[in-house]
Amino acid sequence: MADNERAPGREALTHAKRVVVKIGSSLLTNDGRGLDDQAIGGWVDQVAALHAQGLDVVLVSSGAVAAGIVRLGWLSRPSAVHELQAAAAVGQNGLTECYEGHFGRHGLLTAQILLTHDDLSNRKRYLNARSALRTLVDLRVVPVINENDTVVTDEIRFGDNDTLGALVANLLEADALVILTDQEGLFDADPRYHDDARLISEGRADDPALAAMAGGGGALGRGGMATKLRAAQLASRSGAVTVIAGGREPGVLTRLIGGARLGTLLRPEQAPMAARKRWLAGQLQVRGRLVLDAGAVRVLRDQGSSLLPVGVKSLSGDFVRGEMVLCVDEHGKRVAKGLVNYGADDAVKILGRPSHQIESILGYIEAPELIHRDNLVVL
Ligand SMILES: Nc1ncnc2c1ncn2[C@@H]1O[C@H](COP(=O)(O)OP(=O)(O)O)[C@@H](O)[C@H]1O
Ligand SMILES: N[C@@H](CCC(=O)OP(=O)(O)O)C(=O)O
């Protein structure tokens, strides 16, 4: 890369050692005409160049469903789940073959990893996935990850691969998450509808003003900019910087890592969370909802305290001990998420009560807290 491209403020990328690169459906499938082999070859060449510089690069690649639809000769995206699952199974083969062939030109091995939300929400499977991925990276293999679309249904899917990319960045404690898409980055309005939209070059991952500018996805992609910003927030929890950039920009990956001012850089502002808290924060499914009083909201936010039953006003949902619930304030604003010590049937009996009364009310005591602070993450 030319030295004059090295822009100030991009050190998080020039110093990166481990990078997760997510390539979106919007880019991979040649505007719906099947996998864009040439474009994939171009990104693989860049990943290989970064790999040769000593960086660990992990790919999160979409495109299975779109590629499968074309391979099967279907004219449009089906809406039936079983047809989408079938398309993903056919298309994933093509995707793997394509990456393997291109990385093979560089003498690099790839590994296909298909993950579901369940794999990352079950703590044991999460730890297994983490150690397998870390081992592959240590072996200098390039993992190519996608959601296991063939076995997921709507309620349990990530849906977009931006979220998956962020969780992989957390899992590997990557320094950077690079999200390649069909736009140059995040604009102050959706450029599909606003000709005068301007590119945001930098911002904070958790800036609500940016989230307000981010709209939904195009015909091929799933999440649009909204899921990319949420992914940046998730990635920031392990200290990773996120860049959203245009995948068709020549040399985009090598230039970004060289420090070029391309795309939108989203910086993490908070100190990285401990791995267990990150795992909690990454859980997408909640089984119930607790409404907290103002005092409980304050001590959770300001003092990092556990949640006691006395601070909970009401609950909804059908959860059992150990499941994830969302805590909201009296106006419904999200405050925290955590794993409950009591199932809904028992929890409802101890709401608003001091913990020393739990045993006399329930006939047993599991713990004085409804959610212990180790199992709680403030949002
Ligand atoms: N503020 C915005 N800036 C840029 N793109 C936006 C914005 N809001 C919505 N979008 C849309 O997000 C799309 C990219 O997301 P998506 O279609 O999900 O692609 P991918 O498959 O790469 O994830 C763009 O084509 C763009 O139209
Ligand atoms: N897992 C899906 C991709 C989902 C998807 O399109 O996500 P995204 O690239 O974030 O818009 C597939 O391979 O078809």
Image (cartoon, rainbow, N blue to C red):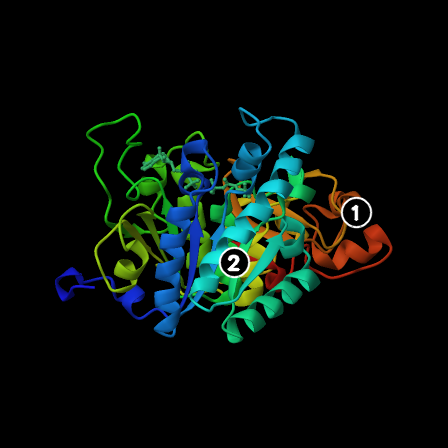
- Across and down, in percent, residue 244 comes to 34, 49
Give amino acid for label 1.
Asp
Give amino acid for label 2.
Glu
- Across and down, in percent, residue 121 comes to 65, 54
Q: Is residue 267 left or right of residue 223?
A: left
Crowd band around label 1 with a 10 angstrom C-alpha radius: few (<14), some (14–19), many (20+): some
The secondary element bearing badge 1 is classed as: helix
Q: CA distance from mark 1 to mark 2?
A: 53 Å
Q: Quadrant of ligand 1?
A: top left
- Across and down, in percent, residue 321 comes to 76, 53
Q: Is mark 1 within 8 Å of ligand 2?
A: no
196 or 208: nearer the viewer: 196
261 or 325: nearer the viewer: 261
Q: Is residue 229 above or below residue 143?
A: above
Please name the residue that numbered disc 2 is placed on.
100
230 or 174: nearer the viewer: 174
Residue 24 sits in quarter: top left
Please name the residue that numbered disc 1 is placed on.
346
For image coordinates 45% across by 49% down, the residue present is: 231
